[in-house]
Each structure stands twice: as C-alpha cells, then as structure tokens.
Image (tube, grey):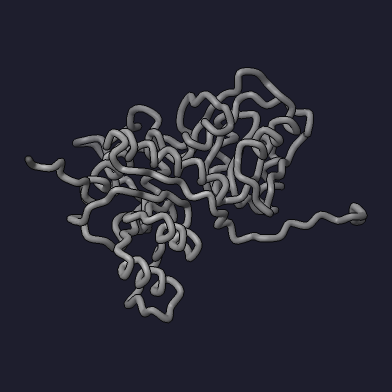
Amino acid sequence: MTGVPSTTLGDVLAALEAAYPPATAESWDAVGLVCGDRAEPVSKVLFCVDPVESTVDEALEVGAQLLVAHHPLMLRGVTGVPADDPKGALVHRLIRSGVALYTAHTNADVANPGVSDALAEALGLRVTGPLVPAYEPDAGSPETVELPSYTGTGRIGELDRPEPLREFARRVADALPETAWGVRAAGDPDRPVQRVAVCGGAGDSYLSAATRAGVDAYVTADLRHHPAGEHLAAGGPALVDVAHWASEWPWCAQAAHVVRTTFGGTVEVLVSTRRTDPWTVGVTSRTGGSSQ
C-alpha cells in the first residue's frame, strides 16, 4: 500500500505565492526563499513578523521545518553570510537545523487580502476599498489602468457606528498586541470616527492619500513629528500611531490560514506570539512634565 505523499516545502511555497505573488513586490524588496530545499517535507510552519533570534529560537523549539516572516532578513545585498555576523549566524542556525526561511513583504502588503486587510479586520472595520489602488500598464497604451478588487496599499473601512477618537484609540490598543510603544492619537479627542484608513507598517508617505480619501482617522505606524503636525494643520484626518510590529502582526494569522486551508489541516501552522518590536521600555512622567 502506497502512503500519502508528504507535503513539500515547494508545495507550501506555491500556496503562499498564489496568495502573495512575488511579482507584485516592490522592485527594491527582497522576498522569497532565503534558505531551504523545496524538495524537503514540511509538516509544521511558524509565522512571524521578524526573522530574528527569538523567532528562530521558537521555530527550532516547536520543531517547524519552515519559518515564514513578513520582514526580509537581508533587504540589502550582501556578499556573504559568515557565522560571526548576526544575520549570517541566523542563516547558519536555520540550515544546520533543517529549517527553511521564506519572506513575503510588499507582495503581502498589496495582496487581497493582505497585511492591511488583517489590520482592518482586527479593528472591526468593514473594508470598502484600497487606500492607494494598484495599477498596471494598459495593453497598447502608455496609460495605466486600476487593477480590480482591493489590491493596493492600505485599506479604507468603516465601523458600524461612529465613536469618539479617544474611544477609537482604545479600540486599536485593545485589538493589537501590547508594546512599549503603545498607541497614541493626534486630533480632537471628541472627533467622531467611523470611516477609517489603515496601513500596516510605516505609512506616513500616505498621509495625503488618507486626506484625499476623506476618512475620519488614519491608523498606521512610525509616524514622525513634522509630517504629522503639518498633516493636522492642513485639516487632515485624525491620526492613530501604533508600533510597526504590532500593526503587521495580524497578518501572521491570515497567512497561516492560507496554509491551513490549502492543505486541509495536514500541515500544522503556528503563529509566533513573541514580541519582536525593538522597543522594550515605555515611560510616562509621574509628574506630568512641564508645559510652555
């Protein structure tokens, strides 16, 4: 009697690449298989945001044959991966342990569903469209056409009912994993929020898009002082700034679902809960500081 063929790394990657096509990644990005043999069997996969020491530790501890990360391990070109280099050391550990590493980055950002869909779902938003639609060249024409569905960067969504910004910020904090960075909001605390733009990861380059979209609030990560202040002064929507890692962590469950459903549960999927946000201490003044 012939046994059921085992699922290979190549099989799992085919499922992931159908959901997050590598060709849709930005030209500067580094997505795909970092290390691993596509012919090797895979029975357990761990999903994470960052391929760092703690998530590699976890992959080895749980016995995963594949670690799927959102952020690339080597975004910029390298000429070698020596074991005495922090990133090289991770590659050596993975290879020695028989664990493959795969990354889906900007291709997961623009996918439908993708990173921002997962963020919107976590916040209880009903997605109505992309914040910045994806485009492709029109055949035989120098112009471009908008791609169908919700492909593109960021998402626009709606709450069932409006709520004040201060309550909406609490909703965001309750929906995402806790970090030292926390959640902070900019704008009138009593401003009603119902129509919301979200962008997982660093999203201050889309502040003008959020304004054009006419949303009440924009949720993203890594907002900077001057762009945020100028955006508000120009009458833009309220801002909710969260930790980069926290904004993208909901995607891990989405990607895990792709593998779980594709293989009917025959491949075990796990989502890392180890906080890989680099900030470890958040401090507020006991005296409230001083004001000018």
Query: Residue 231 in the image: x percent, y percent?
Result: 66, 43
The answer to whether 232 is drawn above or below residue 128 in the figure is below
Is residue 167 left or right of 72 when viewed as pictured?
right
| The C terminus lies in quadrant | bottom right
Is residue 281 left or right of 22 when viewed as pictured?
right
Nearer to me, 256 or 149:
256
Query: Residue 102 in the image: x percent, y percent?
Result: 33, 55
Q: Where on the picture, by quarter, is residue 81?
A: bottom left
Residue drawn at 31 percent across, 68 percent down: 95
| The N terminus lies in quadrant | top left
Residue drawn at 54 percent across, 43 percent down: 206
The answer to whether 80 is drawn above or below residue 102 in the figure is below
Q: How many marks?
A: 0
Give the residue at the far front of this rendering: 1
Nearer to me, 62 or 125:
62
Query: Residue 186 in the image: x percent, y percent?
Result: 73, 41
Residue drawn at 35 percent across, 66 percent down: 94
Confirm whether residue 131 shows in the render: no
The answer to whether 233 is drawn above or below residue 285 in the figure is above
Residue drawn at 55 percent across, 37 percent down: 198
Is residue 209 left or right of 252 when viewed as pictured?
right
Confirm whether residue 278 shows in the render: yes
Query: Residue 38 in the image: x percent, y percent?
Result: 21, 55
The answer to whether 33 is drawn above or below residue 125 in the figure is below
Is residue 181 left or right of 290 when viewed as pictured?
left
Nearer to me, 203 or 289:
289
